[in-house]
Amino acid sequence: MKEKYHNAIVYGVNKNNFPKVPVDYGYRDSTHFWYSKFKKPIGVKIPEKPLLDLNSVKYAASRIDPEYEFTDKACEKLVKIPRIFLKVALSGIINEARMMEINKTDGKYLIDEMILDAINDKRKQEKK
């Protein structure tokens, strides 16, 4: 494979670096579906997947652990997590919150946006 086409696949396809071959079945990268009519390819924008709604995140968060409660602001920060990873992400947040000293109010530990920010900062420091 030519280096130009290899780089196009790895770093992103556009109409200038698409191979000059007819593609009647198409090629899909992360943002476009590409097809060609023996000349320059035509890119059709792939529609954005809908984000989770706030109620879905709140429902999943309430079912993870009955001792922990997420505020609405905290759930709003988690709306962009893909549904398939939501349970794992919420479990990880609760595990991190267990290690932190959180005050118990009304018999539950409250996870708010400040705690989420602290967890994100801690993860960023661990990556460095």
Image (tube, grey):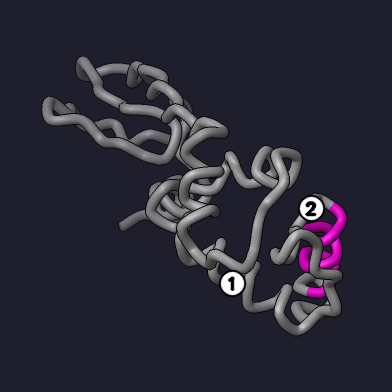
Tell me which corner region of the image, top left, top right, bottom left or bottom right, holds residue 76: top right
Q: Amino acid at mark 2?
A: Asp
Tell me the tag on residue 106.
none
Vertical relation: 26 (above or below) 67: above
- Towards the viewer: 118 or 18: 118
Q: Amino acid at mark 1?
A: Gly
Tell me if mark 1 has few (under 14), some (14-19) or many (20+) residues whose alpha carbon lies within 10 angstroms of its own: few
Q: Residue at 75% across / 78% down in the picture? A: 127
Region rendered in magenta: 114-122
Q: Which residue is mark 1?
A: 92
Left/right placement of residue 103 relative to residue 96 reads right
Q: Which residue is mark 2?
A: 112
Q: Earlier in the sequence, mark 1 or mark 2?
A: 1
Q: Position of residue 98 (x, y in %)?
A: 71, 80
Residue 115 counted in the magenta span: yes
Give the SS element for disc 1. helix
Residue 14: in magenta span:
no
Relative to 110, is 65 on the left or the right?
left
Task: Identify whether 33 is placed above or below 84.
Answer: above
